[in-house]
Image (cartoon, rainbow, N blue to C red):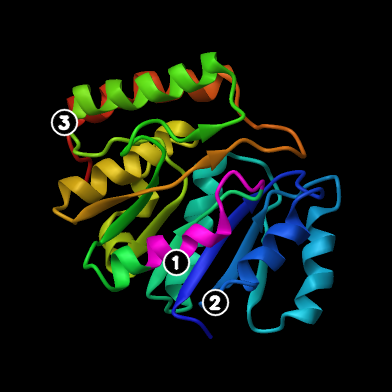
Amino acid sequence: MSDTIVIIPTYNEKENIEAIIKAVFSQEKTFDILVVDDNSPDGTAGIVKNLMVKFPEKLHLEVRQKKTGLGAAYIHGFKWALAKKYEYIIEMDADFSHNPADLIKLYNACAVEGADVSVGSRYSVGVNVVNWPMKRVLMSYFASKYVRFITNIPVCDTTAGFVCYKRKVLETIKLNKIQFIGYAFQIEMKFKAWKHGFKIKEVSVIFTDRTKGTSKMNGSIISEAAFGVLKLRLKGLPK
């Protein structure tokens, strides 16, 4: 058993899931993987089950019966990981927008360099995004600027979904009190970690848009982020 679990939430990711699992397992450091699948109708979970025979003890699967949002899937995974006593818990997308080779950077930022939370950041050094239309790049970039302005959180890429947490951070944050399920979930988790006094370190990574499968981004997720930030700022840190 590794000291680190990589949580990969999935919904209809049959084109990517086998390749991303094998890519994570090919890294020099050993990482375990938990796939949290929202009952994908395309058979994603079945592919994972077949791979579990090849990677016993390292690959795990949780299937939720309903698709209730990215945040809910991650919280399910966080609770599972804490129960299994992992020391480091990493969020990662299934579609190769996050490079598996960067996992070690996030791990080292926490395990070696002393951070409590490490963020794979698109915006800490310039704008490192590949294959996104300019409209989406600008929307994402200025969304992070907006969040930083409203909340004062010292993080350049507040909506980043490539994040490593030390277990003590997730034990401290009351996961049952998390309010948001989309982009705002990522903001809320970083905001609460910061308000609790945990050290957050950004690690510059290159984000590459998916080439297979379908993006889950939609207008409701974006609006949740915009208005959710104001709620976080007004309420401070909900207990």
Q: Tag 2, which secondary structure?
A: loop
Task: Name which residue lies at 86% across and 46% down.
Answer: 42
Q: Are marks 2 and 1 in contact (CB under 8 Å)?
A: yes
Given the current orientation, which residue lies at the most extreme front position? 126
Is 76 drawn above or below residue 190 in the view shown?
Answer: below
Residue 78 visible somewhere in the drawing: no
Q: How many marks?
A: 3
Amino acid type, residue under disc 2 in the picture? Glu
Q: How crowded is mark 3: few (under 14 residues within 10 Å), some or many (20 or more)?
A: few
Is 137 drawn above or below residue 152 in the view shown?
Answer: above
Amino acid type, residue under disc 1 in the picture? Ile
* Cα gap from disc 3 to disc 2, whole angstroms: 37 Å
Magenta segment range? Answer: 95-107
Query: In the rendered image, which residue does mark 1 sit on?
Result: 104
Please state which of residues 209 and 215 is positioned toward the viewer in this rendering.
209
**Which numbered dot is residue 28?**
2
* Cα gap from disc 1 to disc 3, whole angstroms: 28 Å
Task: Name which residue lies at 25% across and 39% down.
Answer: 155
Q: x%, y% of residue 127?
A: 40, 30
Asked whether, in this view, residue 151 is left or right of residue 225, the answer is left
* Cα gap from disc 2 to disc 1, whole angstroms: 9 Å
Please state which of residues 200 and 123 is positioned toward the viewer in this rendering.
123
Q: Which of marks 2 and 1 is nearer the N terminus?
A: 2
Q: Tag 1, which secondary structure?
A: helix
Query: In the rendered image, which residue does mark 3 sit on?
Result: 152
